[in-house]
Image (cartoon, rainbow, N blue to C red):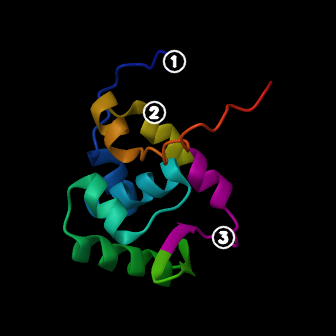
């Protein structure tokens, strides 16, 4: 990680910008991971699934997020049709950089481990 100015950014600033703590956390999670589903987000954030689902639906209704179905799971991501989606993603990623490391780790989901015996791609 690069050195960050120590302005002590807490979730208060993103929560104020995005209308609440849950909205800010959900948007930060989606920006950090490109997409997510309600149970995954709730588990990572330590929040009730219903609370996360309501926020996801609210953000989808407001055209901030879009959803697609994969089997029985609804995956949410940033709405690519939003005219300022790149600016919003940049703002969220920038805010993520200034959060304490523990909160950054909480918002990042580790991908699946590599298949046993699968080699690494050659450079």
Depth-wise, is mark 1 or mark 3 nearer the camera? 1
Tell me the element at label 2.
helix
Please determine whether, in this image, residue 121 is positioned above or below residue 74.
above
Q: Residue at x 64, y 61 (%)?
A: 85
The one nearer the camera, 44 or 57, is: 44
Residue 83 forms part of the magenta stretch: yes
Q: Indicate left or right for 51 with 65 as reference.
A: left
Residue 94, image x, y percentages: 51, 38
Give the CA separation, mark 2 to mark 1: 9 Å
Q: Residue at x 28, y 38 (%)?
A: 10
Q: Which mark is residue 97?
A: 2
Q: Which mark is residue 2?
A: 1
* Number of residues whose C-alpha sits closer than 10 Å to that of mark 2, classed few (under 14), some (14–19) or many (20 or more): some
Q: Please report the bounds of the magenta region as a residue range.
A: 75-90
Residue 71, image x, y percentages: 52, 82
Please tell me which of labels 2 and 3 falls first in the chain. 3
The mark tally for this picture is: 3
Tell me the element at label 3.
loop
């Amino acid at each position: 990680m690069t050195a960050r100015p120590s302005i002590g950014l807490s979730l208060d600033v993103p929560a104020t910008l995005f209308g609440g703590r849950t909205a800010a956390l959900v948007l930060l999670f989606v920006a950090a991971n490109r997409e997510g589903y309600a149970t995954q987000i709730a588990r990572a954030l330590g929040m009730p699934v219903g609370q996360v689902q309501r926020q996801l639906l609210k953000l989808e209704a407001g055209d901030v997020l879009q959803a697609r179905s994969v089997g029985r799971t609804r995956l949410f991501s940033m709405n690519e049709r939003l005219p300022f989606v790149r600016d919003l993603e940049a703002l969220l990623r920038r805010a993520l950089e200034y959060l304490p490391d523990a909160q950054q780790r909480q918002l990042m989901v580790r991908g699946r481990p590599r298949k046993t015996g699968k080699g690494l791609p050659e450079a």
